[in-house]
Image: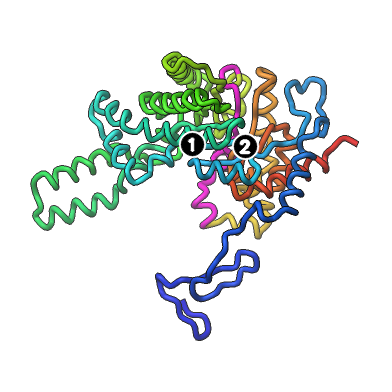
Amino acid sequence: VSVNSITLKEGDFVSIDGGSGEVFVGEIPTVAPSFEEQPDLVTLLEWADEIAAQEGVRQWPEDYQGYPTRGLQVWANADYPKDAQRARNFGARGIGLCRTEHMFFEEERLPIVQKMILAKTAEERETYLNQLLPFQREDFRGILRAMAPYPVIIRLIDPPLHEFLPSYEELLVEVTEMRVKGVSGPELEEKEQLLAAVEAMREANPMMGLRGVRLSIVMPEIVKMQVRAIFEAACLEAKEGVDVHPEVMIPLTSSVNELKLIQTELEKVARQVMEEQGIEVEYKFGTMIEIPRAALTADEIAGVAQFFSYGTNDLTQMTFGFSRDDAEGKFLMDYIEKGILPANPFQTLDQEGVGKLVEMGTRLGRQTRPELEVGICGEHGGDPESIDFCHRAGLNYVSCSPFRVPIARLAAAHAALRHAPQ
């Protein structure tokens, strides 16, 4: 890339000022900002929390049972203990999304995950799951400890299994090259078996394929291991006096029958672990609402789920029929420039479409279960305009990345002030 007399090649360092957008050649020394060393900001955010926490800032018609009368809480998305601690430091009052599958991509864990996926028998798969369990348990212990006494929502495995395996296209090239070079024996045989396994898992549309609760139903042993790890972690921390509140989230539900089937099995595991450990912990089972049908049948789903978390990224894709990657790369900016859409719906919640599903799902769910805990955990959880909508829709909390927590805390206070009864 050349600009005036300066030419940059692949691998050259540049530094970008995130405030002004200026680009500097080379790697400029940086200083990590310290939240605690900005007392004025800390005080301002404490005031914001006090405003949002006031009872009576939201009022509802008499038949809106269970709707919160205080403002929104701000939770955070965190996949590792260090993320949870950072979120806590920034003022988060819970973890709204812990994505368990991210832990599987760690260098020492991924080979075990791949062997588990490729296992030919249930017994063989169980062997590898038992090797993964201690890793998951220790991660969960760290997150629960970092956030105590606040709730931690842990989402069970969501993506399709092929995401943990090598790319089919890359494997095909590799096997073809080995055949051309005359490679034979165990090395080629192993690669061919891997290629065949990856090919068998390929899907025409993975986003709508074997993932989430569907994967849990087809291979329940994976999520049973995860639930065992969650409750072993919670019980061990509780024995040390830590006030833990795990909440287990089942993703991609579209039918209450999916939830009835898998949640019943998982609650058995939870009860078994607590009996083994000789201690009870307070917990919840709930689901992610990210398919329109789930929002439309939320009254049925709330008969089983104790909480809802709107996965607004996927709910937006499913509602618009957009693939986010394709839309943002090919036509979404044209839609915004030509006035078809007022904003990027993956950054600011589409209140007219997706928002109606959120309102409807919340209303239906609380008609069945008035105490239903409801929040969002998509990217929208850190967007001020979307936070304002969540306040008006009657959600309990928004969850965003740790670094967006301060902005979300201010936005929650703004919403409470803006819409407070006169």
Q: Residues within 10 Å of mark 1 (few under 14, many from 20)?
A: some
Image position of 336 with respect to 388: above or below: below
| Residue 31 position in % (x across, y down) | 57, 63
**The C terminus - image quarter:** top right
Indicate left or right for 241 with 90 as reference. left
Task: Let me know if residue 128 appears in the view.
Answer: yes
**Which residue shows up at 66% across the image and 55% down it?**
37
Residue 142 circle label: 1
Type of amino acid at the residue the image marks with label 1: Gly
Q: Residue furthest front?
A: 240
Residue under label 2: 376
Image location of residue 11, percent across then percent down: 40, 70
Q: Are marks 2 and 1 in contact (CB under 8 Å)?
A: no
Task: Please tell me which residue lies in front, 360 or 126.
Answer: 126
Instruction: Identify whether 419 is placed above or below 270.
Output: below
State the residue at coordinates (64%, 43%).
381
Question: Mark 1: which secondary structure?
Answer: helix
Which corner quadrant of the image does residue 370 belong to? top right
3D distance between C-alphas at marks 2 and 1: 23 Å
Q: Residue furthest right?
A: 422
Task: Specify the segment rendered in magenta.
Answer: 303-329
The spot of residue 265 in percent (x, y) is 43, 17
Numbered label tally: 2
Res. 265 in view = no
Residue at image position (64%, 53%) is 35
**Dot 2: what SS?**
strand
Q: Residue at x 49, y 36 (%)?
A: 142
How far from the left and from the top, in percent, is residue 36? Answer: 65, 51
